[in-house]
Amino acid sequence: MMVDNIMISSNAKQYIFENSSWIRLIEYLHQENTHMKNRLSEIIDQITNKESLGLAEQYQNKFLTKDDLYDHMLYVLTGQAIKWKELKSKPTAAIGTEIKRTHKKIREQMEFIEKDHGLIKQDYNTYLSSLPINGKH
């Protein structure tokens, strides 16, 4: 494995900071996902239109898939945090290209996850606001 001889100071600290931020973001997105699932369960009995029920089921499936994704990403990020912590504890630690490559891959995944969550949340809120309330609409 090739190793870049980079002092742990600034570069590793940035990687550690990003990883920590991603863990907080995933925890937040998981909470948001749970909030959206709870809202769906509150209104599901009021939906009478078959098309709207079908969409509700699609959202429910998306939320379950997102739960699995968030759990997986939290596992990956926690593993990365441990690796970074081990590197940080070495006074002149060098950052291996493998861990940097993994970090870059995770960065790309996190960017996608964040954008995807925003789109789903926007579509979901539009869907909820379009539902008839008390037989009106």
Image (tube, rainbow, N blue to C red):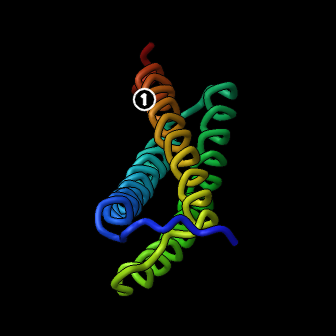
* Residue in the picture at 38% in, 86% down: 90
Q: Quadrant of residue 96?
A: bottom right
Residue 31 visible in the displayed image: no
Residue 115: give x, y in percent of width and height. Answer: 49, 34
Of residues 24 and 44, the one drawn nearer to the viewer in this rendering:
24
Judged left or right of residue 64, residue 37 is left
* Residue in the picture at 46% in, 81% down: 82
Q: What amino acid type is highlighted by mark number 1?
A: Asn
Judged left or right of residue 113, residue 86 is left
Residue that badge 1 annotates: 125
Residue 31: give x, y in percent of width and height. Answer: 38, 57
Q: Residue furthest front?
A: 5
Residue 48: give x, y in percent of width and height. Answer: 59, 31
Judged left or right of residue 42, residue 70 is right
Name the quadrant of the C terminus.
top left
* Residue in the picture at 63% in, 45% down: 62
Pointer 1 local density, CA inside 10 Å: few below 14, some 14–19, many at least 20 = few
Q: Secondary structure at mark 1?
A: helix
Residue 5 visible in the displayed image: yes
- In this picture, is 18 found above or below 62? below
Q: Residue furthest top?
A: 137
- In this picture, is 47 found above or below 65? above
Residue 84: give x, y in percent of width and height. Answer: 44, 75
Name the quadrant of the N terminus.
bottom right
